[in-house]
Image: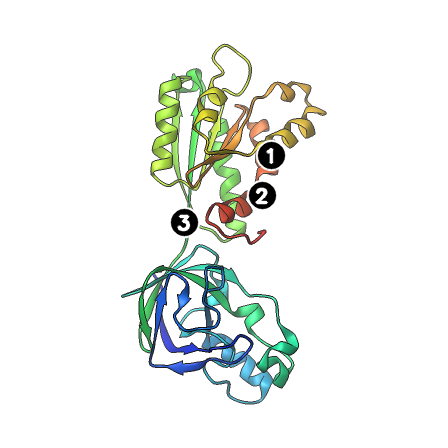
């Protein structure tokens, strides 16, 4: 687990001005007490590393003072701009969660931009919200904790459960999501269950994965109209919110190619902070469905965690 140091803590009373170093800052549910940027929004606390300072100092032709980029916390020991939303910084007294990387440049309204004609904050500054209140001062340190995406995979199949054939659909889900999250530089862990077509067992397994705080739960099998196809009937009543557009789009798009796809009763929705997707039971369908689902996957995860980043 990587650690990094706090070199300075800084406050400004007005937006668009440089911040001044202070002995300590008090972090609460709205950010830095007494700072112009505090409030219940994505950018309540700003951070910038000396790794970024050094590059910009060369461009500016002078040493840049801590707080001059309007950052609340100046750090050393980690490239902050390589972290991702929902990663955490855990200190002895406080804990922060990354909410945004960079921001729109204010241009002529920014004091540093007026002087140099450029600013590093829009590209390499990051923003966070406070998860644990407390004081922070120069010399304190943080541990960097990456957000690990937890994925639950449930395959429903009497025959696969009996060992009559291998569960290729469940394996395909893990393969595709592993590739997706590798591209996003996100670590991922799986909780996999192969169960028979049993209503009570499906409900219990799904709710257990929700309790284990899986970010995503994907089922495969049981979405058709056969006598033993029960997945949507069990899952839909458990959803806090349904997301009908995703599955409607997939049925229409692939139904033109494979008309049988129009008989799928696949559903998507949210239970607590878990995204739930119920897919058909063939590897081909899994690939088709996940290809479309992945287009909104990170955005959906962010929205569940109150981050409207359109990512």
Asked whether, in this view, residue 250 is left or right of residue 76, the answer is right
Marks 2 & 3, CB-CB < 8 Å contact? no
At mark 2, the secondary structure is helix
Q: Are marks 3 and 1 in contact (CB under 8 Å)?
A: no
Residue 98, horizontal then vertical, whole percent: 45, 60
- Residue extending farthest to the top is 227
Pointer 2 residue: 296
Q: How many marks?
A: 3
Q: Residue at x 37, y 81 (%)?
A: 22
Badge 1 element: helix
Residue at image point 45% right, 25% down: 237
Mark 1, residue position? 246
How far is the residue under mark 3 from the one under mark 1? Answer: 24 Å
- Secondary element under disc 3, as helix, strand or loop, is loop
How crowded is the residue under tag 3: few (<14 C-alpha within 10 Å), some, or many (20+)? Answer: some
- Name the residue at 32% across, 72% down: 136
Q: Residue furthest bottom?
A: 62
Please give the residue where the numbered disc 3 appears in the rendered image: 148
In the image, residue 265 above or below residue 142: above
Judge by depth and name the residue closer to the eye, 192 or 38.
Answer: 38
């Amino acid at each position: 687990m990587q650690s990094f140091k706090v070199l300075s803590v800084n406050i400004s009373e007005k937006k668009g001005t440089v911040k001044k170093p202070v002995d300590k800052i008090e972090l609460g549910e709205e950010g830095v007490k007494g700072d112009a940027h505090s409030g219940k929004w994505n950018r309540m606390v700003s951070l910038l590393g000396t790794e970024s300072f050094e590059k910009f100092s060369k461009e500016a032709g002078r040493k840049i003072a801590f707080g001059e980029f309007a950052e609340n916390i100046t750090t050393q020991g980690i490239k902050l701009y390589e972290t991702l939303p929902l990663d955490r910084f855990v200190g002895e007294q406080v804990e922060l969660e990354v909410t945004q990387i960079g921001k729109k440049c204010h241009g002529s309204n920014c004091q540093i931009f007026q002087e140099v004609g450029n600013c590093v904050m829009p590209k390499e500054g990051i923003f966070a919200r406070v998860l644990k209140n407390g004081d922070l001062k120069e010399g304190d340190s943080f541990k960097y904790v990456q957000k690990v995406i937890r994925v639950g995979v449930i395959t429903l199949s009497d025959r696969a459960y009996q060992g009559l054939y291998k569960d290729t659909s469940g394996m395909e889900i893990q393969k595709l999501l592993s590739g997706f999250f590798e591209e996003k530089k996100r670590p991922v862990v799986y909780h996999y269950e192969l169960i028979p077509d049993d209503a009570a067992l499906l409900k219990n397994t799904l709710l257990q994965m929700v309790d284990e705080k899986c970010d995503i739960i994907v089922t495969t099998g049981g979405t058709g109209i056969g006598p033993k196809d029960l997945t949507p009937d069990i899952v839909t009543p458990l959803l806090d919110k349904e997301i009908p557009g995703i599955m409607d789009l997939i049925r229409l798009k692939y139904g033109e190619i494979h008309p049988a796809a129009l008989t799928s009763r696949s559903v998507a929705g949210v239970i607590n902070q878990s995204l739930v997707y119920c897919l058909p039971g063939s590897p081909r369908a899994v690939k088709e469905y996940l290809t479309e689902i992945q287009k909104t996957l990170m955005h959906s995860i962010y929205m569940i965690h109150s981050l409207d980043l359109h990512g």
